[in-house]
Amino acid sequence: MSAARWKISVDRRVCVSSGTCEELAGRWFKVTDDGTRPLAEELDPDDDVIEAAVGCPVGAIRVVNAADGTIVEP
């Protein structure tokens, strides 16, 4: 049985590009002049991604199970 995979997304309509996600999980997020974006479409579960989602000041980050779409965070 393979381990669960996650998908991450950033709602750019809500995102204020504070940089918190990049600071907490720079391996997975990048803040650019055009806003913040995830650096991978799918990833193995990573506590840093959860910290970034929880730490986002406007709740713009969503983490879901790639297999069935269930919400992991928020």
Image: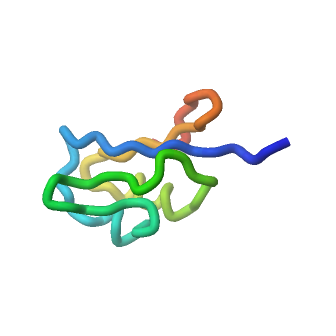
Residue in view at x 51 percent, y 42 percent: 7
What residue sits 31% from the left and 46% below the top?
A: 59
Q: Is residue 37 left or right of residue 42?
A: left
Q: At 26% across and 65% down in the image, what residue appears?
A: 19
Q: Where 40 sits versus 67, above or below? A: below
Can you say which quadrant of the picture contains the C terminus?
top left
- Above or below 67: residue 42: below
Q: Which residue is the extreme one toward the bottom?
A: 23
Q: Quadrant of residue 60?
A: top left
Tell whether 31 sits left or right of 25: left
Identity of the residue furthest to the left in this view:
33
Residue plotted at (20% across, 58% down)? 17
Q: For the view shown, which residue lies furthest in the top direction?
A: 68
Image x and y of residue 3, in percent: 75, 47
Q: What colouring method underlies this structural image?
A: rainbow
- 67 vs 22, left or right, is right
Q: Position of residue 45 (x, y in %)?
A: 62, 54
Nearer-the-camera pick, 34 or 12: 34
Q: At which x and y percent is residue 32?
A: 20, 61
Quarter placement of the N terminus: top right
Nearest the viewer among 73 and 33 is 33
In screen coordinates, is 12 left or right of 44? left
The quadrant in which residue 14 appears is: top left
